[in-house]
Amino acid sequence: MRILLVASATPSSKTGVTAHYNRLLAHLAGRVDSVQLVTPEDVPSLLKKGLGVLRRLAPLFGVNGRVIWMEIENYVSIWASVRRYRGAIDVVHAQDVTSGAAAALGLNKQVPVTVTCHFNDDPLSEYKTVYSLNDWTNRQLLKWYQFLFKQPNSFITVSDYIKRTSAFLRPEGVVCDVIHNGVPFPSEQPRQEDDAFSVLNIGTIEARKNQRLLIETAHVLCQRGITDVKVLFVGDGHQRAELETLTLEKGLQGQVRFEGYQTNIPAYLQRASLYVHTAVNESWGYSITEAIAAGTPVLALETGGIPEQFDWQRAGLLPLTTTASELADAILRYRGETERRSLAHTQLMFARDRFSIDNMIDKHLYVYRRLCRRIVSEDAHNPAVAVS
């Protein structure tokens, strides 16, 4: 099989989407005939210049104009970029519905397309969370996404939660598979914990990730006279400066450190005593899976698709309404090495086979083969194709 991955997120963007398609590129290689990637960076040069001119005009129409133009630009870029692959691929695997619909129509609906939905809840809710859009723009986006969702042949969601929350946009009867994110699980989990008890948080620093809660928790611990718990934030984002200021205001320079964006995540996980995920909404929580695979015990708020990573005992899951004081209590329950090892073992035993990278790739290959068989079957029953 010849697989074409398409995405609106470019390789330089530091997002979970790019991490996901980079894993697909690495682990599909050798298991399919070819796997290639197309993003807006691959748009033909003349069109790229034209789109660049229009991009500079979009801000004149405010945030509503920027959002609408972003959708149009991503769609046109993918539509134009995939056309050179006509007759050269068997399956398109899109990482968002805009690029999936653009690829389907750019290839004249001759190649089956499946779309992985990485959004939280649904794309319309994400826009409403991030931008203050007027009613007209929200109505146009609804119509736009209803159109986009009609184009792919099937969908993949990274959690049962997202399959439920986005169902209103999918056409009735279309196949939607749940394929949980996968990571490599080493045969052993080497631990190199720091001498100081350290709490790690990984992710974009933004309101949805709720890192403020962890800073407030560090403050509560200090008020209780516990100053040897260190909090490390790995990641970057528009709220970083604000939270750094908050850290200074609360006098937590000795307890809280911002590491910025890092690529050597396993090294941080191996040194951490505890991984704490504070997001208030999450389609899956890839860094949780990474932490479990590294043998690092995890505490996480019970929201979105996160509970699907935990067994029936839900060890490590905390209520979404958890306060800073309650999170401090939870962290202190796992200060002992015995307690941490027990939690890490429970979480690892549940996740190892379910969320391995091999399992994830096997499920994707099944979806690709099913799409190819469907196209062959449809062609066999199509008189126009049969005659030719």
Image (tube, rainbow, N blue to C red):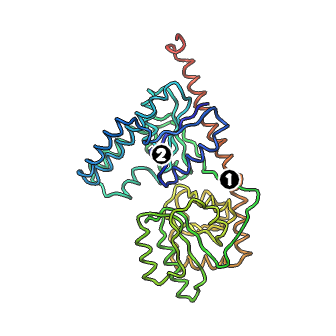
Residue type for callout 2: Ala
Q: How many marks?
A: 2
Left or right? Give the position of 196 relative to 222.
Answer: right
Residue at the far right in the pictured view = 187
56 left or right of 216?
A: left
Q: Residues within 10 Å of mark 2 (few under 14, many from 20)?
A: few
Mark 1: which amino acid? Answer: Pro
Label 1: how many Cα within 10 Å (few below 14, some 14–19, many 20+): some
Residue positioned most to the bottom: 225
Distance from the alpha carbon under mark 1 to that under mark 2: 30 Å
Above or below: residue 221 compared with residue 203? below
Mark 1 or 2, nearer chain start: 2
Identify the residue under disc 1. 184
Residue 305 horizontal/vertical position (percent) = 55, 56
Is residue 355 or residue 378 the one in the foreground?
355
Q: Which mark is residue 110?
A: none
Q: Give percent across and percent down for residue 296.
A: 67, 66
Q: Which residue is mark 2?
A: 167
> In the drawing, does residue 278 fall left or right of residue 56?
right
Nearer to me, 301 or 205: 205
Q: Please report contact status of discs 1 and 2: CB closer than 8 Å, yes or no.
A: no
Q: Secondary structure at mark 1?
A: loop
Q: Nearer the viewer, mark 1 or mark 2?
A: 1
Whole-percent x, y for residue 11 in the image: 49, 48
SS category of the residue bearing label 2: helix
